Image: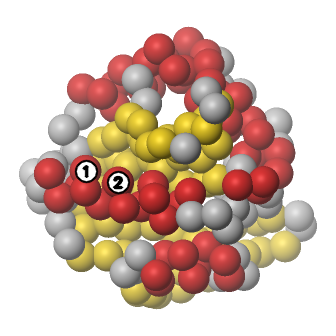
């Protein structure tokens, strides 16, 4: 397993990973089949991210297949360009094997090289494995976003978490 930086040529594999992740869990923003991202749209997004100094998508690759990702998108204004929002996911069969920890380590290495000062994320309050991972990576809870999401006919709170580098 290795951690790689995604490029536009990997758009098809990235779309496949997204579809797999969204089908496996209710912990992501989009539900199964809800996001309709074409390979062309993914390619365009990856090109755009590649052009930004404060954005990257890292992925865990195993035997030629993407098994997880971490997307970092930085602020566009001078006042928030030092802050990145992250979204991450690892396929179920690879969870608990250190994949996410390796991605977070590589992400932090990238962040430090690119003058990122603050890394932010949100996580559903009942996603205990993810919360423990984020705490282990040095993130702290900053607040609760009440009734932030509507999942399976229920309102769900999210924690806002961040790490200062």
Of residues 72 and 68, the one nearer the viewer is 68
Left/right placement of residue 138 relative to residue 60 reads left
Whether 88 is drawn above or below 16: the answer is below
Say whether residue 74 is left or right of residue 21. left
Give the answer, above or below, for where 69 lies relative to 132.
above
The answer to whether residue 97 is left or right of residue 113 is right
Considering depth in this image, is 160 or 50 the residue closer to the camera? 50
Label 2 with label 1: CB-CB less than 8 Å: yes
- Kindly identify which residue carries mark 2: 106
The residue shown at (25%, 50%) is 110
- Give the quarter of the image for residue 23: top right
Q: Evaluate whether residue 152 shows in this view.
A: yes
Give the secondary structure at mark 1: helix
* Residue 16 at x, y percent in the picture: 70, 29
The numbered disc on residue 110 is: 1
Q: Considering the numbered disc 2 on the image, is that residue within a helix, a strand or a loop?
A: helix
**Residue 44 in view here:** no
Residue 18 picture quarter: top right
- Name the outermost residue toward the right: 153
Q: Which numbered disc covers residue 86?
A: none
């Amino acid at each position: 397993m290795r951690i790689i930086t995604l490029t536009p040529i990997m758009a098809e594999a990235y779309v496949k990973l997204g579809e797999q992740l969204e089908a496996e869990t209710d912990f992501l923003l989009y539900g199964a089949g809800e996001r309709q991202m074409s390979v062309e749209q993914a390619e365009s997004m990856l090109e755009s991210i590649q052009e930004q100094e404060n954005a990257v998508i890292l992925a865990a690759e195993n035997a030629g297949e993407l098994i997880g990702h971490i997307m970092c998108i930085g602020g566009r204004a001078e006042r928030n360009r030092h802050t990145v929002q992250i979204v991450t996911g690892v396929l179920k069969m690879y969870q608990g094997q250190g994949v996410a920890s390796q991605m977070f380590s590589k992400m932090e290495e990238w962040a430090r090289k690119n003058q990122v000062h603050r890394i932010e994320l949100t996580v559903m309050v009942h996603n205990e494995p993810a919360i423990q991972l984020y705490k282990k990576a040095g993130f702290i809870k900053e607040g609760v976003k009440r009734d932030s999401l509507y999942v399976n006919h229920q309102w769900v709170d999210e924690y806002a978490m961040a790490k200062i580098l």
